[in-house]
Image: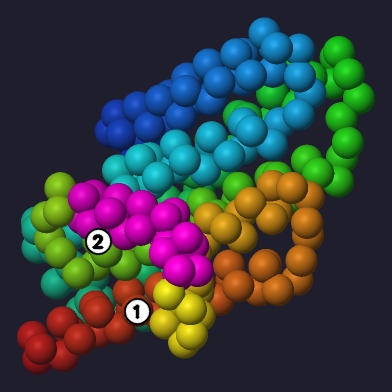
Amino acid sequence: MYAILKNELKSYFDSTIAYIVIGLFIFLTSVYFFLGNIYNQSSDLSSLFETMGTILLFIVPILTSRSIAEDRKNGMEVLLITSPSKLSDIVLGKYLAVLSVFFVMVIITFIYPMILLLFSEQIIIPLIGEYLGLILLGASMISFGVFVSSITENQVVASIVSFVGLLFMMIIQPISNSLGGTISKVLNWFSIFSRYDDLNRGILGANTIIYYLSFISVFLFLTISAIEKRRWSKG
């Protein structure tokens, strides 16, 4: 797994994709931080974190589209699935590589509360919830994006499907509430953004954390299963 992770990280940072995505994320969040907090003299970062979640809707599909789809397109997947490495190690290595790029973005955003601390006192508990929510949301979105990348060899298709899927997860709550019954419960399971709102308000619930971890586990399992199915079909 470590070898896969190292190789994937190298491929991200040897190309321009990681720098472009990180730069775009920081630029957009910095503009919003300046307008929403510095210009308006507000120490409330909840609105900024909501914006970060929305920006991830566009960023994550770009990051995850190449994770497995690229290997399928250039034939590298055959070498990977016939190697001694476990499929779970391969998938986890690729997932953790994208997650590492995401963590770099998150770490850079620490500068925002640090700047506010120079002018006002920050309430630590809400800030913990906001960052925890951002990390769990991003990790969940990435697991879905990696799964989508595993079922197509076209990076553009993977990006579009991931974006549409994540967009659906964003707007699913009002849709499910209008339906009711079992369908509503099933649809609400995919409502990752509604739970993010709870953490963004400082509501640290164990059920929410368990939900996100379960969401990540399910889509990583589905990714492994998709590759395993291709391995058996190729003999």
| Position in image of residue 93 (x %, y %) | 42, 63
Badge 2: residue crowd in 10 Å (few <14, some 14–19, many ≥20) = many
Residue 162: say if magenta. yes
At label 1, which amino acid type do we have? Leu
| Position in image of residue 4 (x %, y %) | 37, 60
Main SS of residues in magenta: helix
The vertical placement of 122 against 222, above or below, is: above
Q: Quadrant of the C terminus?
A: bottom left
| Position in image of residue 110 (x %, y %) | 69, 30
Residue tagged by mark 2?
Answer: 149
What is the basis of the colouring in this image?
rainbow
Residue drawn at the location 57% of the way across and 58% of the way down? 194
Q: Is residue 170 left or right of residue 125?
A: left
Nearer the observer, 48 or 75? 48
Pointer 1 or 2: first along the chain: 2
Q: Report whether residue 119 is seen.
A: yes
Badge 1: residue crowd in 10 Å (few <14, some 14–19, many ≥20) = some
Quarter where residue 116 is shown: top right
Q: Quadrant of the N terminus?
A: bottom left
The vertical placement of 154 against 78, above or below, is: above
Q: Secondary structure at mark 1?
A: helix
Residue 89: say if magenta. no
Residue extending farthest to the right is: 121
CB-based contact (under 8 Å), mark 1 and mark 2 = no
Q: What range of the chain is rendered magenta?
A: 158-178
Quarter where residue 152 is shown: bottom left
Q: How far apart, in angstroms, are the residues tagged by discs 1 and 2? A: 11 Å
Label number found at residue 222 = 1
Q: Report whether residue 94 is seen.
A: no
